[in-house]
Image (cartoon, grey):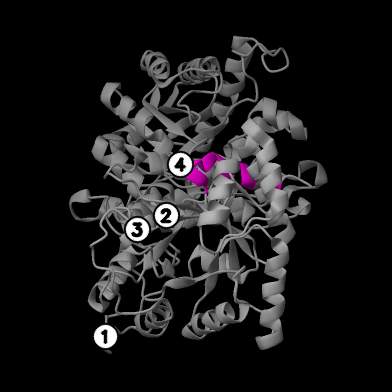
Amino acid sequence: MAENLRYLEAIRDHVLVYDGAMGTNIQRYKLSAQDFGGEHLNGCNDYLVITRPDVIEEIHASFLAVGCEVIETNTFRSNRITLAEYGLQDRVLEINRAAAQLARQVADRFAAETGIPRYVAGSIGPSGKLPSSDDPDLSNIIFDELADVFAEQARGLVEGGVDVVLVETSQDILEVRAAVYGITRYFQESGNRVALQVQVTLDVSGKMLLGTDIAAVLAILEALPVDVIGLNCSTGPEHMREPIRYLVEHSTKPISVLPNAGLPLNVDGEVVYPMQPQPFAHILGDFVEWGVSCVGGCCGTTPEHIRAMRAALDAPGRTPRIVITSAEPNPLSAGDAQLAPTRLAQKLAAGKFFITVEMPPPRSFNAQKVLAAAQMLQEAGVDCIDVSDSPMARMRMSPWAICHLIQDRLGMETILHFPTRGRNILRVQGDLLAAHALNVRNILVVMGDPTAIGDYPDANDKCDILPSGLIRLIKHNLNGGRDQAGNSIGQPTAFTVGCALNLTPKDIDAEISSLRKKIEAGADFAMTQSVYEPRKVEQFLKRYEELYGPLTLPILVGILPLYGARHANFLNNEVPGISIPESIMARIAAAGDVAPAVGVQIAAEILRDLRGMVQGAYIIPPFGKYEMAAEIVEALAQPV
């Protein structure tokens, strides 16, 4: 038997870095139906190895250029069953051979130029059938027929020159067994043997599509002639922590992990994977520390993600917990000389509607509940988390830590509330530099709650600088590369700064005068007190326009959903600056036990009425009921 096991020799020697997402990077080319070979083949990415091999070659090369060692063939759906959707079922061998040969040529060229061996993995995705399913339309194929489907694809890949056959994104454990049976039978019958790697996909609950958990997966794969076991796709790396830990602790075989760049989001009708290269590489670095042998990326990952992983593995002592820079500046990286605007700044500049949700830090050092809530909100479509600082003057964890953890673990941007109260000018500037070092670059400057109302009424309540002065210090001094005294800070910061605003004040002109000072100081956006009367917002904006012309400062309007009649009465009667119309008070009072759901409806209605007047929502969930914020976001996404 002719054996090519150099891939297994390499994996025993060092951690192998795979490439990223083929499909994601094909989308960047904006190809037409003609590129695919005609309208009937439009969307058949795998056929591009025949019609546009130059595109696939460029993608392979882009990943090899940033340091990956293993590239996957563009054959994820190149089996007889899935190709039949395009009438290509009789060209399985041709397509798989061509894809493998193309990848082999690119890999060999880079190996010759750099002296570093490069490997080719033959990608085999699911057949589209679920033999374990009760659905006759999905399971109408017998085991041996399915094994033949995978054997045929493996033949084309091996004949084209792959180093490893990669069965990936598997959702049915019986289909996995059929794939392994068919591929190993081909190895035996042909006399051609390469490494065999199998990767299943788990949902956020840690199970395959039909309920198989990680313990069952491992028990089955350990008993099969599989060389490498792993996970890929479906979720981001954070959801893979426990399954990967289990595999590392219990498997006798090398482990691979190729996550998505976070859970997919729907942004303006497009699927977006939000996780930036730095947090992605950070978590993959954890996996390497545990003993994982292969790391790479699946959906949403780009050469920048792979560059970050390569940098982590090449760091002295192979310590992955480092600040990693990517090929292009990214909004969560603080080490570049010229940082890109934050995602908040970019979205506001593009005129897109932005949603942030306020979260207070915990009273202890345990942040798990906060992180879980933030992840739930991220999955619901929230753009950002804004973290308050000691609300109601109650002692809580520093908000910088929570902002950093959310950005680091979830790849989700944050806004740091930054009160001037209780800080002298030394602490103010030091705290801001610390926030920037933690990649927290969206700041909401506020006065802060007086200590007299909180846990420590005798604590220092003085401030050296007012909000408008602090905005000016940040925008004109720190963002200009110097401190308040004019001393250099090495390189400029790149903060995006927000200010507080009351859209329903008793004295509109006085509030507008205060807002003008903040705008002149350099404020980039405003976040407002809770609003219940869109008509008053319109009055405020109209008065501003009469005095100074149209207000161009982006406004994120405060939305505090009402939880019940008692909550509404408290806000209306005891919280300065909040006024709730009688019609809404009556509606909440009449709602009874379903008042929270009615509160969500009212909040969504207010936001719809404010569309065109504001550029985003600043949702403040009552009593930590973050599900209400998620429900508001979902309600906004529904057609009216």
- Earlier in the chain: of badge 2 and badge 3, it is 2
Residue 269 seen by the camera: no
Of 588 and 522, which appears nearest the observer? Answer: 588
Identify the residue under disc 2.
Answer: 277
* Kind of residue at badge 3: Ile
Identify the residue under disc 1.
Answer: 488
The region drawn magenta spans: 621-637
* Kind of residue at badge 4: Ala
Q: Local crowd at mark 1 within 10 Å, few (<14), some, or many (≥20)?
A: some
Of 581 and 560, which appears nearest the observer? Answer: 581
Spatial separation of the CA atoms under disc 2 and disc 4: 23 Å
Spatial separation of the CA atoms under disc 1 and disc 4: 40 Å
* Kind of residue at badge 2: Pro
Q: Secondary structure at mark 2?
A: helix
Lateral position of residue 252 relative to residue 52, left or right: left
Residue 126 seen by the camera: yes
Tell me which corner region of the image, top left, top right, bottom left or bottom right, holds residue 243.
top left
- Across and down, in percent, residue 196 comes to 42, 26
- Nearer to us: label 1 or label 3: 3
- Nearer to us: label 2 or label 1: 1
Identify the residue under disc 3.
Answer: 453
- Nearer to us: label 2 or label 4: 4
Identify the residue under disc 4.
Answer: 373
